[in-house]
Amino acid sequence: MLIADEKTVKTPVLADNPYQPHLARIVRIFKMVPDNHLFTLRFEDQWTAERFKHRPGQFMMLSVPGAGEAPISISSSPTRPGVLELCVRRVGRVTDALYRMQTNDVVGLRGPYGNGFPIETLIGNDLLIVAGGLGMAPLRSLVWWALDHRDKFKKITLMYGAKNPAEMLYRDELVSLADRSDMQCLLIVDRDPTGQWKHHVGLLPTLFDHADINPATTYAAVCGPPVVYKYILQRLLALNFSKDRILMSLERRMKCGVGKCSHCSVGYKYTCIHGPIFTYWDAINLPELV
Amino acid sequence: MKIVKIPKKKLDLFASILRQHWEIHAPVEQNGRYAFKPLTHWSEARLHYNRTILPPKKYFMPPRETMFHYREGKGYVPAQEELDQRLILFGVHPCDIYAINILDEVFGGKYNDPYFQTRRKNIGIIGVDCTPDEHCFCRSMRADTVEKGFDLFFTDLGEEYMTLVGTSLGDDMVLMAAPLFEPITAADIQKYKQVSSEKRQAFSLDVEIHDLPEIFELEYKSEIWDELGDQCLSCGSCSMVCPTCYCYDVADTVELGSKAGDRVRTWDSCLFHTHALVAGGENFREKRSSRIKNRFYHKQRGMVAEYGRPSCVGCGRCIVGCPVHIDIVQVINRLRGEDHANRG
Ligand SMILES: Cc1cc2nc3c(=O)[nH]c(=O)nc-3n(C[C@H](O)[C@H](O)[C@H](O)COP(=O)(O)OP(=O)(O)OC[C@H]3O[C@@H](n4cnc5c(N)ncnc54)[C@H](O)[C@@H]3O)c2cc1C
Ligand code: SF4
Ligand code: SF4
Ligand code: FES
């Protein structure tokens, strides 16, 4: 009977499925740091590749066949389209499986997800980017976006700290930034066993002693492990930063990336859609955020 | 809205007409409790029941659902085999319909969940009114009546069921069985008002939700949460039986000896220890007290911010199902400092 048949719409799942991973090929694996490799990926499907747009601070859900899915920040800048760079730390099931793959193997990607940095708001201001350890992964996209739109910002300052030079992500790239005159790139390591390190040695917050930051005209973007947040926030607040000029990128467990599974909830927000970029003001108003 | 009525003794006939097109699922009794099950005979259906063990959400987001098949060369192929199942849920209570309406919002929006939405389209709902028992507080949660989300809605007037027609599909159902339905009379309307006021008076539980978000903020550090954390077993029952708890987990399975596999999602609970665990062993809700607080907080506070109302519909399932008798109504009343207000 017609009426009953109309009820069963042939499934639209294929048409518009936010959970659909698109196949992407690994075009390059750069062994940047042990257990922190940089994977360069290209969508198999030209249509998907051409339509793909992201903003700094957003992330992808990366699928490794048989192993599962994991949220990974987009490390490359939208100003350098065509491929996506993901800096992945090997920690468990999905990331292990990724590390067993080789160039030309195929993974799944969906996204981009998350709010990303509010670049419209940042434009016209000074930019202070502070990263600790793997925190450089999501911030690198912002660094290059800003440098590729250099005229849109006043002062640009980057502070990045790693345990030692061997564990510094994007080391060569960042070291060359230190030579640029249109920005200040401050690099620091806790220890320097090599004796070859020409930049700072010590703890990340001490870099503030080398920079001249005007809190009234600056937006600060911070990412790193909890201890980094703790001490960097102290510094920024001591400088009298307004709480909504401090932006932080947060990590939570994520299963869907699109605000459905509840895994990433903080207080009453979802990190995956309301974040992962939050202002410090959001943070203190959401229980459990940091 | 089109409103008609059907004599009770003609219900089995109505059901047999519907069964020509749909599989009918209705509450069936099992050792004094109820569960939605496929009917083999209309006589198994129980339209007077307090609550089913699992809410109807099991039809819209099954406890275990395959999302994709992974096939080498083909990639991730959406699993749609089960989605075309055509059925009618006969006898859904207002609070449970309300809950499905809340899930509509959660699984809709910018990122539409096509699995949920397809099932929602393919499953007809015939609601039925009910009489509250000692654990129901849907009236406090404003979910004792529902104005959308059903195809038909039945209210017991004694000899017949008054029938609200909610959708064009519902209208089709009525038209298919047109000779069974009758127009309503002035006497029916009187009777309906009487039933409605009797229902209102039958509630023994009450909570005030008006400024609950503020109370939750004020009591965020209350020692009540530690107490609850000490009692709670983290068994997750309260989430499983809740019609609006929608957390899920996703995992990939591999077929032995091949590169093919499935991506499967399963019900999860924010009460489980691993729910908020991240790399490096950092767990944002390590303590049980913070997890149980998160559940209450998300339902009564978070959902208000996101969707304009708490997601609890007052069905009472978590009260009945908790092995250590944690009672959401008591918790709210204690937070409000009104623990004497109800049963005690
Ligand atoms: C928005 C966002 C951006 C991220 N960006 C990056 C990135 O650029 N590079 C990168 O290497 N990692 C990133 N992560 C972390 C990454 O998602 C997890 O390390 C990854 O999910 C672990 O997956 P797995 O299957 O390999 O490990 P599992 O086997 O799942 O778990 C290994 C360990 O990781 C923990 N874990 C599981 N899921 C997460 C999670 N979502 N976040 C943190 N820990 C988790 C587990 O509790 C366990 O301790 C990001 C996470 C988020 C939420
Ligand atoms: S929280 Fe409890 S009473 Fe409220 S809807 Fe869920 S199971 Fe029902
Ligand atoms: S049912 Fe009770 S014991 Fe089990 S997780 Fe929920 S509150 Fe805790
Ligand atoms: S990851 Fe599922 S809700 Fe955020």
Image (spheres, coloured by chain):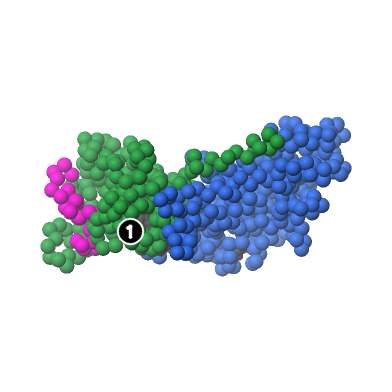
Q: Colour of chain B?
A: blue
Question: The magenta stretch spans which residues?
Answer: A160-183
Q: Quadrant of the C terminus of chain A?
A: bottom left
Q: Colour of chain A?
A: green
Q: Which residue is at a point 63% across and 53% down the rendered structure image?
A: B58
Say if residue A152 shows up in the picture.
yes
Q: Quadrant of the N terminus of chain A?
A: top right
Image height of A224 relative to B14, above or below? below
Image height of A31 relative to A218, above or below? below
- Residue B32 at what x, y percent from top left? 77, 61
The residue carrying pointer 1 sits among few (fewer than 14), some (14 to 19) or many (20 or more) residues within 10 Å by Cα, namely some
From the viewer's perspective, is B56 left or right of B71? right
Q: Quadrant of ligand 1?
A: bottom left
Q: Which residue is at a point 72% across and 48% down the rendered structure image?
A: B24
The total of numbered circles placed on residues is 1
Which three-letter amino acid code belongs to the residue tagged 1? Met
Image height of B138 relative to B240, above or below? above
- Residue A150 at what x, y percent from top left? 21, 38
In the image, A239 versus B316, the foreground residue is B316
Specify the subunit that label 1 lies on. Answer: A
In the image, A276 versus B10, the foreground residue is B10
Judging by the rendered image, the residue that carries numbered circle 1 is: A101
In the image, B297 versus B171, the foreground residue is B171
Query: Which structural element holds mark 1?
Result: loop
- Residue B3 at what x, y percent from top left? 77, 33
